[in-house]
Image (cartoon, rainbow, N blue to C red):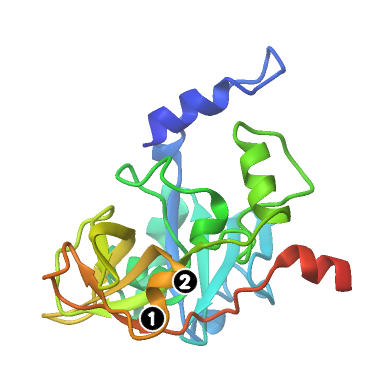
Amino acid sequence: MQAALQKRLQMFIMRAKAKLADVTEAHVVLGLAGEAVAAALVPWFPALPDAPYGKIDNQYGSLIRVADADGAPRYQWITSPETAIAAWPLLSSSLQALSAQAWRLSEIHAGIAQVTLATQEQFVPQMINFEVVGGVNFKKGCYPGQEIVARSQYLGKLKRRAVLASVEATGIAAATEVFSSNDPEQPCGMIVNAEADSAHSSLCLLEIKLAATEGGTTVHLGSINGPQLKFHALPYSIIDVTDAELSA
């Protein structure tokens, strides 16, 4: 996905001397979560960002506080491979090392959608709650599709959103369709992200018609005969950010 995204972004660079480059190999991203992180990071970051999306830069790299999950703070430390290798023994002595899958699961718990190759160009930002979690700014920028995004925000009522659900299934691929009992022939949404949270079940973020989550409607994975999804509350409220701005 990086190569396609870089090519796309290059089209909008207006300064002739500005170039985009893939610097993946020059950086390491460490994900850290939990109350113990503050003490573990003291050798490199004596103070931490005190709110989600705050950032601290120093000679050891950039530390970004991302959205909390299950009430616990989470951080991404972007640093050099050399610094990461040197820091790892001390970090792993005070924090439990987990897999990348555990981090992806924490993203779902936080209600933060990740667009992948399977789901690129499938959503406008509001369908996956980006305007609620700070993923889009309606006062800045200019981009293809902006008119559609702005129209969705300022005119009409949003009929599709990202919701949190669990299901008795594993190995669920992004873009898998879901079906509701009130219209079993047509998909009412799709999986955005899913990760196993036990040997037999998964936690999912899915984009869905809000009408399919109301009343006595049931929603099923893959087909109307597939396993039923159980919906859960997101860790944030879905509000109209434009209304919030007007009332501020």
Quickly name the residue at label 1: 95
- Which of discs 1 and 2 lies nearer the camera? The answer is 2
Residue 145 left/right relative to 191: right
Q: Position of residue 142 (x, y in %)?
A: 71, 34
Report, in whole angstroms, how far the alpha carbon at label 1 lies from the one at label 2. Answer: 24 Å
In the picture as drawn, the residue positioned furthest to the top comes out as 16
Q: Is residue 178 above or below residue 94?
A: above
Instruction: Assess disc 1: are there few (<14), some (14-19) or many (≥20) residues with their C-alpha within 10 Å of its C-alpha.
Output: some
Instruction: Assess disc 2: are there few (<14), some (14-19) or many (≥20) residues with their C-alpha within 10 Å of its C-alpha.
Output: many
Which residue type does callout 1 highlight? Leu
Residue 222 left/right relative to 39: left
Which residue type does callout 2 highlight? Gly
Quadrant of the rendered image containing residue 245: bottom right
Q: Is residue 148 above or below residue 205?
A: above
Q: Secondary structure at mark 1?
A: loop
Q: Quadrant of the C terminus?
A: bottom right
Query: Which residue: 13% across, 70% down?
Result: 226
